[in-house]
Image: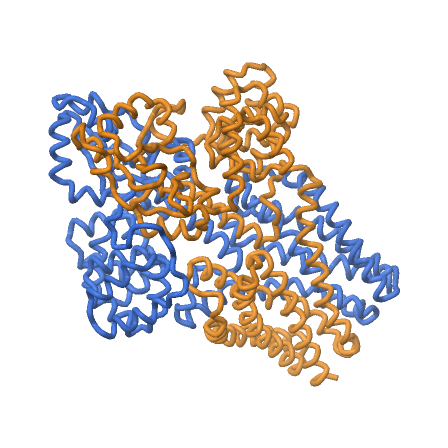
Chain colours: A blue, B orange
Amino acid sequence: MVDTSRDRPAGEFRPDTEEVPWLTLADLIDEGSGAEVQAFIDRLSPAETALAVSRLDPARQESLLKILSAEDVAEMLVDLPDEQAADLLGDLSAKDAAEIVDFMESNEQADILANVGSREVEAILREMPHEEAARTREILAYARDTAGALMNTEFVVFEEQRTVDAVLSHLREKADTYSDYEVQYAYVTRSGLLTGVLRLRDLLLSRGQTQIRDIMIKEPVRVLTGATLSDLVQLFESHPGFIGVPVVEPLGQLVGVVRRKTVQEAQGEQAKSLFLKFSGIVGGEEYRSLPVHQRALRRLAFLAPNIVLNMVAASVIAMYQETILAVVALAVFLPIISDMSGCAGNQAVAVSIRELSLGLIRPGEYLRVFSKEAWVGLANGAVLGALLGLVAVLWSGDAILGMVVGSALALNTLLSVLIGGSMPLLLKRLGADPALASMPLLTTVTDMCGFFFVLSFAKAALT
Amino acid sequence: MVDTSRDRPAGEFRPDTEEVPWLTLADLIDEGSGAEVQAFIDRLSPAETALAVSRLDPARQESLLKILSAEDVAEMLVDLPDEQAADLLGDLSAKDAAEIVDFMESNEQADILANVGSREVEAILREMPHEEAARTREILAYARDTAGALMNTEFVVFEEQRTVDAVLSHLREKADTYSDYEVQYAYVTRSGLLTGVLRLRDLLLSRGQTQIRDIMIKEPVRVLTGATLSDLVQLFESHPGFIGVPVVEPLGQLVGVVRRKTVQEAQGEQAKSLFLKFSGIVGGEEYRSLPVHQRALRRLAFLAPNIVLNMVAASVIAMYQETILAVVALAVFLPIISDMSGCAGNQAVAVSIRELSLGLIRPGEYLRVFSKEAWVGLANGAVLGALLGLVAVLWSGDAILGMVVGSALALNTLLSVLIGGSMPLLLKRLGADPALASMPLLTTVTDMCGFFFVLSFAKAALT
C-alpha cells in the first residue's frame, strides 16, 4: 500500500548523497530544540540516521536521547542496526530505557534487547508496566531465530461466533490502534485456540449478520513457537501469497504472528553474519564507532587461536631445517604452497556452506562431495602445480626442484578441496558453526600437509 | 493473506527432512505420467525441488521438462536458483523455451534470461509472441539491479476519470486475471502519466459515482527506471508500509511496479554473492551438479591470478637466501607471519565492506579508517607479536630471534589493518568490486612487507 503520510516529501525519490547529516545534527542538538532535531531525523533514511548518530560524540548522543520524546527515540532506535541501538539504550538509566522500549513492537524489543547485557535487561524489565514486561520476558525466553522470538504479539483476533457487522464496527472503532498493525487479515479463535483466518476482502463482501466462522478460512497453516528460521523460510517459499503466518503453542493457543518481512530480515542477518564470521569478525557486527578495546578484543578472539594453529602447522617446517639448509630455495615456496592450498580449499568450503544452506546437500553426503571435488582438485592441482613447477625451474635452473614444488602443490590442492568440501558437513554434524570454524581448521591441516609434501619430497629427491 | 488453496496439506507445517525426493522423482519420470510427476513436485518445497531436479541425470532432466505442461515447467523453474533454471532452459529448443518463458512474470523472465547466453536469448525471443517479446526485450535492456530490471510489468491501472462502480465491476470481471497480480492497490493515470494510487480499502468505502481521482492518493512516491537497488532499499526502509512502488519513465509514464519482495530478494542475492566472491567463487554461484570443466575453470579464474601474486610476494624471500642460510629457523616463521597478517587485514576489509554497504562510511574517508584502525592494529599487533616472540624464544633459546619475529609481526599487523581497512574504499572509488579484489591484493602487499620486515630485521640483528 502506498502511503504518503510520512514526513518525507512525496514525489520522486532522490537520495541525497552529498549532504553531511551528522554535522547538521550536532548543531541542532547544541541548539537544544527537540522538535527541530526530530524534524531533521524524519528527513533522513534509516542508513543516514545510523551514520549521523554513530558519528556524534558520546555527550551529544546522550543529549540526543534526552531531547527527543521516548516515542521518537523508540522509532529512531528501531531504524538503527540492532547492536548500535542496544549500545545507545544501554547507556541510559533503566527507567528511561524502559519508557522507550515500551513504545516498540514486540519483535523489535526482542531484537534490540537480545544485544543488551542480561543484567541491564533485567533492570529495564523491572521498570516496565507489569503486563508489558511479562510479555517481553516471554519473547526473550524463546531461542534466537525461532518463530517464538520472531513473532509479533500485536495482531487482530476475534472469537468465531461474532458477526460480520460486529467485527466491522469494532475495526472502525479501533482504527487508530490497528493502523500500526499492518492489518491485512484477522485471526479467529474458539476459547483462545486458533480455528481460522479472516480475509479483509471476505469481510467486506459478506452480509452483516453472517457469523465469521462461516466465512473464515478453516484449518489455516500455522507454526509452533519452536519452528526454526529455515522452517519459516521454507514455509513462505511454499506459500508465495502469505504475508504472515500464525504462531501457536502445542495445544493450539494463538500467541503471535510471524510476518514474511521479519523472516526476510532475519535471513538477511544470517547472510551478513555468514560473511562476517567467514572474515574472522565474531561476537556480533563491528562498527568503527564502537570503543577500541571492544573492537580489539573481539578481533583477537579470532586471531589468538589462529596463531596457535599456525604454530602447530609451522612445526612441520621445524623438523626439516636440515633440508632447508641443503636447498634454501624451498623457503621461498613454503608460503606460496600454504596460501594457494588455503585459497583452493576455501572455495570448496564456500560451495559446501552454500549447498548446505540451500538444502542441495545433506550433512551425511561425504561421498558425493569427495567424488565431485576430486575431479576439480585433480584438474586445478595439475594446472597450478605445472605453473609453479615451471616458474621454479626457470628461476632456479633446477628441474628436480620444479618437480618437487609442482607435485607438492598439485597433491595438496587435491587434498585441500577434499578436506575443504567435507569440513562444513562434518562441523554441521558435530553441531559447530561451519562458517566460523571451517577456515582456521582447514588451513592448519592443509599447511601441515603442504609443508610435509614439499619438504619430504625435497629430502628424498634433492639431498 | 493466508491462502490454503495450494496443494500442500493445511495445518501445522512440518518439513520432512528424511524423504529422498530425487529417487521418487526419477521413478515417476520413468513411469511417464506428467500428472503424477506434477502432483509430486507440488508437494515439495522450492529447496526440495531444486535438490531433486539437480540430482537427476541429464536424460531424465530432459524427460521431466517434456512430460510437464509448459505452465508447470515455468512454475517449477521460477522456484529454482536462477543459474540452475537458466541451465535447464538453455538445453531446450528455442521454441519450447519460448513457450515456457511466456508463462512467467516479467521480472522472473528477466532474472532467468540474464543467466542464459545472449544468442540463446535472441532465439527464444524470436519464438515468443511479438508483443511479449518486445516487453521482455525492454526489461532485459535495463541495467542489472535497477528499478527497470526489477519491476513487474503486470499491474492494475485506471484512467482517473473512471467511477468507483466502473472500477469495481471491472475488477470483479477480471478477478481471474488479477488474482495472479497480488493486487493490493491500483494505479491511476492521466493519458498514461502516473497521477495517483488507489487503495482497495478506499474503493470499498466510497460511493459508486465518485470519480477515482477524488479518492486516490495524489502525487504518490515513485522511482525512475534507472533507480539503483540501494536507492530502492533505502526507499522501502523509509516507508515501512509500502509493499510496492510505481516505476516511471523520465516524463512520468507509468511502466511498472517494483515490489518490496523483489527488492528483498535482490538484496539477499547481493549478500550471497558477497560471501561467494570473498571466498574466491566468481562468475556466478557454483553448484556441484554443474559440469566439472565449468567448475574447475571458474575456480581457476580466481586461483591463477592469485598464484602469480603469491610468486611476486615470495620473491622478497628469494632476495634474502643468505639470511635464511645463516638463521634457518626464520623459514619456520615466514608462513606464520604471512597467514596472521592476512587474517588481521581481512577483518579490517570485512568491516569496511559492511560499513560501506550500510552507508556508515563514505569512499573518501581514509583518515577516519586510518585513525580507527591504528589503535586496533597497535593493540592486537602488540599482543600477537609478544605471543609469537615468546614462542620463538622458548623454542630456539635465542632472545634476538624472538625480538625479530615478534616486532615484525607487530609492525605488519598494524600495516595490514591500515591497508585492509582502506583497500575497499580505494577499490570502490576506482569502480572495482571491493569484495572480489580486496583480499588477493591485500595479502600480496602484506606478505611482501611481512617477509621484508622479518628478513631485513634478521639480517641486521642476527647475521
The image quarter in which residue B453 lies = bottom right
Q: Is residue B439 visible?
A: yes
The image quarter in which residue A398 lies = bottom right
The percent position of residue A352, horizontal first and vertical second, equals 58, 44
- In this image, B383 relative to A389: left or right? left
* Image quadrant where one finds the C terminus of chain A: bottom right
- Counting the numbered discs, the total is 0
The percent position of residue A327, horizontal first and vertical second, equals 83, 68
Judging depth in this view, the residue of B388 and A269 nearest the camera is: A269
Image point 28% across, 67% down: which residue? A91
Up/down of A437 relative to B70, above or below? below
The percent position of residue A205, horizontal first and vertical second, equals 21, 24
Up/down of A109 relative to B210, above or below? below
Judging depth in this view, the residue of A341 and B295 nearest the camera is: B295
Image point 77% across, 49% down: which residue? A382
- In this image, B229 relative to B56: left or right? left
